[in-house]
């Protein structure tokens, strides 16, 4: 009996000893595994690099798109300093907002625009593109959120209807930019404005809108609805009120304090003070001519402006825009240390090192106030 009890105690002690040994071994294994995991994380952790990408369009003397160029055919400066550039050959799908002026003055021009859905889907968006549709007069209404379905785009454009005599071009542009800036950075952000070149009724100034577009990396294209064609086809009530003796096509909103707006006050109200923004755009015409919003948006974002007087011109604009977007060179570079230390607006100058060629690219970009450039993980 005594031997049996001793044997039981022996096995119990052996069992406890084995359990303690297993626990210590497991703890030791756990303690040695943690540093190995951290080491792996340090080795394969994501590396953040500052990268700037600028789309560039190259044409010959006749305006035809030039293909087949490489990084060595370009020279790019950032704030006057030459940068080492690469050509990004990746395919970035397009996210586009189509913002259409839909007031009474362009009522007769809208039917052709309503039929553009299939052409935009096929010639501009392609298989991976997406589009949203906005219409504006004194209101700004989203007719369709982003979708890659061609039928939804066509249906949204067909919903466009003429409204009041106002045309909040600037406000509609900022609304479009806000939609685009929420899209992933892996997509190209394009805004297509189909409107007259003037603004009537916006709360925002063009300088504020352009700043937002630059921050969001949005390139703006415009199809300029002919003011003359719009004015001669618009209903009389859209052009003037009963007691108004101003000529057709005049801006009908009141100035500050309820006063009548003169051309000077209209320009001041719509364009604001450009000095603190990109550069003094008044230099374009030596202080005499102030560009209308469409011209400002397209020129300074790197886009292009087309004309819409006839249906044929509208069709050609869509075709040319599609060809341009799918033929652009995407030049990328990592700004050098000297450039990275300069916060604020950075002026980009791109040159093509081939004779008899023209180039179109955005004029610059904003570097965040903390000195950080747009970031991309790789």
Image (cartoon, helix red, strand yellow):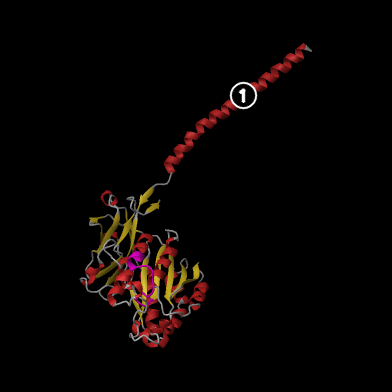
Q: Is residue 221 left or right of residue 30?
A: left
Magenta stretch encompasses residue 346 = no
Magenta stretch encompasses residue 198 = yes
Q: Position of residue 232 (x, y in %)?
A: 37, 88
| Above or below: residue 105 compared with residue 85 | below
Instruction: Point out the residue furthest to the left here.
Output: 286
Q: What kind of element bears circle 1?
A: helix
At x 38%, y 70%, the residue is 170
Q: Position of residue 355 (x, y in %)?
A: 21, 68
Number of on-image labels:
1
Q: Quadrant of residue 222?
A: bottom left
Residue marked by disc 1: 20
User: Bounds of the magenta span?
Assistant: 195-210
At x 76%, y 12%, the residue is 3
Residue 182 seen? yes
Q: Quadrant of residue 18?
A: top right
Q: Position of residue 144 (x, y in %)?
A: 50, 70
């Amino acid at each position: 009996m005594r031997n049996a009890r001793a044997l039981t105690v022996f096995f119990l002690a052996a069992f406890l000893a084995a359990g303690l040994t297993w626990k210590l071994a497991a703890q030791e294994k756990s303690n040695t595994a943690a540093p190995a995991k951290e080491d792996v994380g340090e080795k394969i952790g994501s590396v953040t690099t500052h990268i700037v990408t600028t789309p560039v369009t190259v044409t010959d003397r006749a305006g035809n798109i030039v293909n087949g160029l490489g990084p060595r055919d370009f020279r790019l400066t950032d704030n006057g300093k030459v940068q080492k550039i690469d050509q990004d050959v990746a395919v970035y799908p397009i996210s586009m907002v189509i913002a259409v002026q839909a007031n009474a003055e362009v009522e007769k021009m809208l039917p052709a625009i309503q039929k553009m859905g299939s052409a935009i889907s096929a010639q501009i968006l392609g298989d991976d593109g997406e589009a949203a549709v906005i219409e504006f007069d004194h209101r700004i209404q989203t007719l369709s959120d982003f979708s890659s379905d061609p039928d939804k785009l066509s249906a949204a454009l067909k919903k466009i209807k003429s409204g009041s005599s106002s045309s909040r071009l600037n406000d509609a542009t900022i609304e479009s930019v806000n939609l685009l800036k929420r899209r992933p950075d892996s997509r190209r952000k394009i805004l297509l404005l189909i409107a007259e070149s003037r603004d009537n009724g916006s709360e925002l100034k063009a300088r504020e809108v352009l700043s937002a577009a630059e921050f969001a990396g949005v390139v703006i294209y415009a199809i300029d609805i002919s003011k003359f064609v719009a004015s001669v086809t618009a209903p009389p009530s859209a052009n003037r009120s009963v007691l108004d003796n101003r000529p057709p096509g005049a801006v009908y909103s009141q100035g500050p304090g309820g006063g009548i707006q003169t051309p000077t006050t209209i320009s001041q109200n719509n364009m604001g003070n450009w000095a603190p923004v990109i550069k003094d755009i008044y230099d374009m015409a030596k202080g005499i001519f102030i560009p209308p919003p469409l011209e400002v948006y397209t020129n300074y974002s790197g886009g292009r402006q087309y004309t819409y007087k006839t249906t044929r011109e509208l069709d050609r604009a869509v075709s040319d825009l599609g060809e341009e977007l799918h033929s652009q060179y995407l030049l990328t570079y990592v700004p050098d240390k000297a450039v990275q230390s300069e916060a604020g607006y950075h002026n980009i100058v791109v040159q093509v090192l081939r004779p008899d060629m023209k180039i179109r690219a955005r004029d610059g970009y904003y570097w965040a106030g903390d000195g950080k450039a747009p970031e991309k993980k790789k």
